[in-house]
Structures are given as C-alpha cells and as structure tokens.
C-alpha cells in the first residue's frame, strides 16, 4: 500500500531559532518495518519543511497515498494541529485512512475518536508491530482489526479499544528508515553538518510523579551495542551527521552497560558529538569514568533536576538531592562537558520569593544552560491526577507546551508566574564571567556550541516573551463549564457518558 508518514506543522521557537529541527524518529521507526514489508512509504515533514496543509495535501495526491500516519514529538501540544491536519486531509481526500499515534493519543484515544470522526485509527504505545498488522488488515491480508493489540478504532460508530500490546523485547528487529529523509531540513545549527535523533534504550526505571514517559514505555530495554554504534557510524559517514541527540529517557541506569556502550563508541573513533540526558546521581556514580564520557563524544549532558528543594524532590519521587545535583554539575564542568538543567516551576505553590530562591540556587550551582519549564498536569501521571479541573487556567491545548502556566497558583496570577520565570532566566544568564570563560575552553566544538547557543537562546527567549503577551488565560473554574475541551486536556478524567449527557443537556437548553 502507499503510505505517507506526516509530521504536522507546529514550529516550536526552540526548533525554529534554537538547535534546529530533529528528524521525526518515531515515524521513521514505523516506516522501516513498513518498507521492509513491501509498502511504498513517503515522509512529509510539514514542520521542518514549513509546509502549509494545502501543500501536504498536494503531496499526498502526488504519491497517491492510501494511508496517512500522523505523529509529532511533544504530542500533547501538537494535538490540535494533528487533528486539524487529519480533518483537512479527510475533507480533501475522503477515501484516505488516517492513523494517529504518540504518547498523548495513547492516553486520549477514546476522547479523540469520540469527538473527531476524521481520525480512523489510533495506535497506542509502541507502534512498529501494531502499524504493520493494521496495514496488512487494511490490505485484506492480515488479521481483523479486533485481533490487533494496541489499536483503538470504531465499529458501527462504537469505539473499540483493543487490549494493550506488550513492550517490544527485541529492539534490534526493526530498523529506522533514514533513507526517507530530506537531510537538508535537519541542519546542525551549532556545528557544521547535520543533526539526528537516535535511541539506544526505551523506558525509564524511575517513576517520577510528573512524568509519563516511564508509564508509556512500561519497561526499560535497550538495543545491542554493536548495532547502535553501527548506526552512529552510518549517520556520520553516509549522512554527514555531526551531532546526535539521544531520545533515551535514561540510558545510564546500568553502569556496566553504559561503560561498555561508551567504550565501543570511543573505540570506533567517531567524530560525532552527543547530546544526551542522564540523572545527576548516575553522573556522580560515574565520576571515575567521566573522561570516557568525553572520549565517546558527549559534548552536552541534560539533567532533569526539577528543583533544589529536597522536600519537593522527595514528594515527586526524584532521587537527586540538591547536593548531588551540584556535585554532578561540578564534575561535568571539570571534564569539559556542557550541562543543561531542567527545572519545573509549579511543583510547589510558587511565589516571587520561591522562584528567586531557585534562580539563586541555579547561579550557585553553575550549570551552563537552564531550561525553565512550567508544571503541566498530564492526566496519566500521579501529579496530573491530583490537579482539580477548577485549577486549569489555559483552555487552549496548543499552549500546553511546558513553557507557559496552565494551572493556577494561589500566590501568583498566571501572568505574574510567567513573568517571574522569564525574569529568572534573565538573572541566570547575567553571568558575564561565564561567557568570557568560554573563549578559554580548549575544546573547539564545546566553545563553538556554547558561544553559538547563547544568541540563539536570546532569540528563543524573545520569541516566547512575544507569545506570552498574546496568550489569554481563563479564570479558575471556567474549565469545568466546557467538558468537551476539558476531556481533551485531562483525558481519562471525564467519561464519554458524562460528556454526551452534558452535550444533550446543552442542546435541550
């Protein structure tokens, strides 16, 4: 069959002005087994390619697509764009089958299918096997829809949720369809060459209360070291990739495995630079082998520290006390590795004072970059389930991007909280001495990335500030009056029967 994998247009400022657009690894991971199954697959990245929906439809007609696979990283905030794309595609090409997947649609499958008839199928969880079985069924050569695990669909207007699919045990059995990429769209903004997104492992053994990734992947698994390193070499030598970002939630949990992986990369003599994420406690654990991190090409390491308040960290089940975080940052600095720290504002009731204290703690710890986030209540997480609908002050899902407040603080208005976090970023980066020190760094790539990232961060910052000035916040309690929209913001919290009853009640009035 003729299949199009589509990334809807979204244009995050951090992609547009910051590090650049990353290849859509999720869709490419589905495309590989589909191509190997004998299907004709096309990739249409409307986000990186800056395509209008009319241009996407034109390409679909050109390739004669029979199936449209729609997905986007950050699927919560991308959901409105994804659904609008499905709607317009269905309107223009009524016979096409639309398939939607990702983290958010996995947990909101019933709400989406109940409200959006333009979506035909939703693939829940890992999709490689589910998608190939679905396409075979659509082709009339496979099992019936009811037998496909991990699939949600409609039968005679009734929503059917098939049993979930077990996690894939052998991650080496499927390949990524790198051949579909137009590599010109994925330029490395910091170094000469291109940028790619890769994945060695899936899942996370931790269970932080605000994070849904560990629940989505369910079990931590990894690929073979040899095949992963072969893929890195292929990307460098055949695709001119100079930097890879790892999609792993936590590839450093097993110290023996991590040391073997990094040793294999270092021994291959690759020139690739690596941007990865790890826990601060694992960095401290590995203090003796941090030179190996550097030899393997790790240029920048991101740590989700979330807070320096140990009481908050204990509450959210985060195993990185503030002292461990400070030690990890210091160790990485001594070994010539740039650090990015994620901080989530809103894990406690924020005020001007608490945000100022966090900022001063950050300045003292001295990471190179600070990623300021707002608590966003994903309803499939413990933290999300604890949020009451009356606390929601942002009804537009396209703003649920972790960059703006979406729940009410008792001590600050939404605009005050957004302003305080932006001022926090200014105060953090007001460190001329750090900027001057980058000129003295011996590692040319590290120096170039650090100095190049600063003006890009400034542009992202200004873009986000301009967006905040246009954002409208709702009054607390308004969300409860619109169950249809609230059910999409907090999937699983409102039943389909409740929603139908409210709609009928409104129609009768």
Image: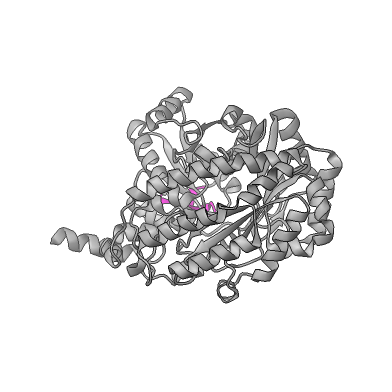
- Quadrant the C terminus occupies: bottom left
Q: At which x and y percent is residue 203?
A: 64, 58
Quadrant in the rendering for residue 36 = top right
Quadrant in the rendering for residue 24 = top right
Q: At which x and y percent is residue 433?
A: 65, 51
Farthest residue in the right direction?
267
Tally of marks: 0
**Along the line of sight, which residue is nearer the eye, 59 or 279?**
279
Magenta stretch encompasses residue 345: no
> Residue at horizontal 73%, vertical 58%?
252
Magenta stretch encompasses residue 154: yes
Image: 90 above or below 482? above
Is residue 409 rendered to the left or right of residue 43? left
Whether residue 197 is visible to the viewer of this picture, yes or no, is: no
Farthest residue in the left direction?
509
Image: 245 above or below 42? below
Q: At which x and y percent is residue 163?
A: 52, 59
Is residue 303 rendered to the left or right of residue 51? right
Read off the magenta span: 144-155
Q: At which x and y percent is residue 147?
A: 53, 53
**Along the line of sight, which residue is nearer the eye, 398 or 57?**
398
């Amino acid at each position: 069959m003729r299949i199009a994998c589509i990334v809807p247009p979204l244009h995050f400022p951090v992609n547009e002005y910051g590090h650049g657009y990353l290849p859509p690894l999720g869709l490419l991971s589905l495309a590989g087994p589909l191509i190997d199954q004998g299907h004709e697959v096309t990739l249409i990245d409307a986000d990186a390619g800056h395509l209008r929906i009319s241009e996407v439809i034109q390409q679909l007609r050109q390739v004669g697509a029979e199936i449209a696979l729609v997905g986007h990283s950050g699927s919560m905030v991308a959901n409105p764009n994804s659904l609008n794309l499905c709607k317009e595609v269905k309107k223009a090409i009524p016979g096409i089958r639309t398939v939607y997947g990702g983290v958010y649609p996995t947990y909101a499958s019933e709400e989406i299918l109940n409200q959006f008839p333009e979506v035909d199928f939703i693939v829940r969880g890992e999709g490689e096997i589910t998608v190939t079985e679905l396409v075979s069924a659509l082709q009339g050569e496979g099992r019936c829809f009811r037998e496909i695990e991990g699939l949600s669909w409609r039968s005679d207007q009734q929503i059917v949720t098939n049993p979930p699919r077990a996690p894939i045990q052998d991650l080496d059995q499927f390949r990524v369809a790198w051949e579909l990429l137009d590599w010109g769209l994925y330029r490395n903004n910091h170094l000469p060459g291109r940028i790619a997104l890769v994945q060695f492992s899936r899942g996370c053994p931790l269970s932080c209360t605000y994070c849904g990734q560990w629940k989505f992947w369910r079990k931590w698994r990894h690929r073979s070291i040899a095949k992963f390193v072969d893929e890195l070499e292929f990307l460098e030598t055949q695709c001119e990739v100079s930097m890879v970002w790892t999609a792993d939630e936590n590839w450093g949990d097993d110290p023996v495995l991590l040391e073997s992986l990094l040793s294999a990369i270092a021994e291959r003599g690759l020139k690739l630079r690596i941007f990865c994420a790890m826990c601060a406690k694992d960095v401290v654990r590995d203090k003796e082998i941090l030179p190996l991190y550097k030899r393997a090409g790790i240029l920048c390491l991101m740590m989700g520290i979330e807070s320096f308040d140990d009481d908050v960290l204990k509450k959210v089940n985060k195993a990185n006390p503030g002292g461990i975080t400070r030690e990890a940052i210091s160790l990485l600095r001594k070994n010539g590795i740039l650090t990015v720290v994620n901080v989530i504002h809103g894990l406690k009731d924020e005020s001007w004072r608490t945000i100022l204290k966090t900022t001063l703690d950050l300045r003292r710890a001295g990471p190179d970059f600070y990623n300021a986030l707002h608590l966003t209540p994903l309803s499939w997480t413990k933290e999300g389930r604890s949020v009451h609908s009356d606390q929601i002050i942002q009804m537009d899902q396209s703003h649920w991007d972790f960059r703006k407040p979406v729940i009410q603080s008792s001590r600050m208005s939404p605009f005050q909280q957004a302003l305080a976090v932006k001022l926090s970023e200014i105060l953090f980066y007001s460190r001329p001495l750090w900027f001057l020190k980058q000129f003295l760094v011996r590692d040319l790539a590290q120096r170039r990335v650090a100095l190049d990232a600063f003006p890009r961060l400034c542009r992202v910052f200004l873009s986000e500030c301009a967006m905040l000035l246009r954002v409208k916040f709702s009054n607390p309690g308004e969300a409860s009056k619109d169950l249809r929209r609230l059910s999409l913001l907090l999937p699983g919290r409102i039943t389909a029967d409740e929603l139908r009853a409210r709609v009928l009640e409104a129609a009768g009035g």
